[in-house]
Amino acid sequence: MKKWLVLGMILCLALAIGGCAKEPEPQKEAAVEEEAAAVTEAPSEGPRAGGVLVYGRGGDSVGLDPAYETDGNSFMVCDNVFEQLVSYKDETTDIQPGLAKSWEVSPDGLTYTFHLREGVMFHDGTTLNANAVVFSIGRMMKERNVIFFGEGFEIPAQERPPEYWVSMEMDGTVGSVEAVDEYTVVFNLKRVEAPFIANLGMHFASVISPSAFLADPKAFVRNPVGTGPFRFVEWVADDHITLAKNTDYWDKTAGPYLDEVVFRVIPENSVRFLELKAGNIDICEFPNPADIQLARKDPQLKLIEQPGMNIGYLSFNHTKDLWKNIHMRRAVAHAIDRKAIVDNIYQGMGQLAKNGIPPTMWGYNDAVPGYEHDVELAKKELELAGFPEGEGLPEITLWSMPVPRPYNPEGLKVGIAMIGDLAKVGINARVVSYDWGTYLKRQREQPADMDLFQLGWSGDNGDPDNFLAVLFDGLADPAVRTQWKNDRYHELMLQGKQTIDQGKRAEIYREAQQVMFDEVAAIPIAHSTVICPLRKNVMNYKLHPTTTVRLKNVWKE
């Protein structure tokens, strides 16, 4: 909770949606063969090796163990340190081979057999093999039904829940994982899972070095070891993370070209943009909308952009009796002027949202009308809730995100606008915020001092399930951040996972969006456009629909 679920400055605002990866029909034996990688277009002299790239971002990582993180600031580093069995192609969510060179799916759709590349090394010098894959996946399983080939590993007890794994109900999907030989891994599923292959390209499914993890499981979160194009060097909290080129990287068809990558923390959007103009950073994450026009006029800068595969939303603490009252939820939904927020804070870089998935995604329900801003209607709902003109209603809290994210440019500004709207109908609210790591941790716990909270999501794999189930199905698991519990919605989410036909799945997800609207599960605010300014000498940097930050093929002129 995407690969969580999870705000801040916009402009590099979320991403374009690529087509959903079409999986092999379970009725047929399906195989995916490795495709030849091609070097991306570059000037005639070709990519140049060497140099340091500095990526300016709004907040620090929470942790660097991809099985346990949910935020984009953590994943952008993990993107370059770790790899998965499958990966997404550049600028789309189409699936291609990753650490697995090929795979087959059984006719009943319950057995997936992956054939690994040989000669791949982890950054600590150990060899990638089937046992490493079994270890990486098995450590997230509640019941460790794993089989190693030869001498395996003893998997330590979990220190904390692997949030993505549990929110996606993977324990109900994966029955066992087996290393049948040194380079073959078999997943046996308990049920058909339509997005299973796409899910294995997500961050939580990263393959880690068992030796490095077992050397000190608690320290791994700050000293990650994978197979990716860059290896971890150092982390200075709230300042920077440094990665160095993996000189033993297995893919010799292209990059990595850069000697070093530095992820710098620069919380203020305007300061971050000034650092870009001054040449102190090479890529600027989430600039202020006003800075985009300045970037267009600067001969040393360029802009890249994509439509966003994302959603920014406001939700309720559904564990509190106050927010189990649908009239209270409706009062808030009609009180907030979402269009004014999008117009004034997103400044042309956002689109008013009415569903929990972006309109570019298959299965989108355009018939859902969205919540109308209507002060009188909000007052009427507040009265139906038992608080006429707010009488007897205690002050509520509205948690606002402290960092810029693709789906929300400035969480605190958005929060201030929202409490102003709420005051007009008689709801007295105050903005609360914390540092990013504390915000995510406390919000997950659904504390009594939280009433409303801002969060959002950039899609991991191009599948509606990755939004609708992972974000909003509170019956799936306590780790789902919006603990809204609705039997019909949960039933639809299960049907969506277990239906292979995409047309039928789209019908299921359209109904689910109507249920969300009718029950006011959450209040969709905006889908953003991603715009990223960078120095002109940075070559071949591409935005991705999943917001992954891929630096393997990037080089500096």
Image: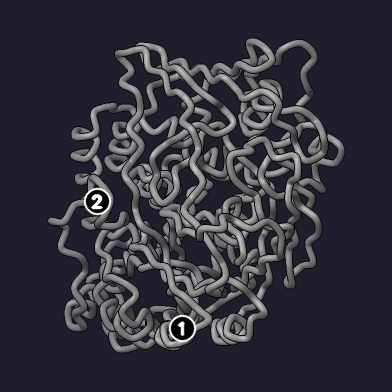
Please indicate, yes or no, whether residue 461 appears anywhere in the rendered image.
Answer: yes
Q: Earlier in the sequence, mark 1 or mark 2?
A: 1
* Front in this rendered view, residue 277 or 473: 277
313 vs 191: above or below: below
Q: Position of residue 306 (x, y in %)?
A: 36, 63
Q: Amino acid at mark 1?
A: Ala
> In which quarter of the view is residue 159 placed?
top right
Which image quarter is the C terminus in? bottom right
Colour scheme employed for the rendering of this structure: one colour
- Residue located 28% across and 28% down the image: 499
Q: Nearer the viewer, mark 1 or mark 2?
A: 1
- Identify residue for label 2: 513
- Residue located 55% across and 61% down the image: 443
Q: Amino acid at mark 2?
A: Gln
- Residue located 80% across and 14% down the image: 151
> In which quarter of the view is residue 343 placed?
bottom left
Q: Element type at marker 2? A: helix
Tell which residue pokes out farthest to the front in this image. 44
Q: Element type at marker 1? A: helix
Density class for disc 1 (Cα within 10 Å; few <14, some 14-19, many ≥20) is many
Q: Position of residue 90 (x, y in %)?
A: 45, 48
163 vs 420: above or below: above
- Identify residue for label 1: 295
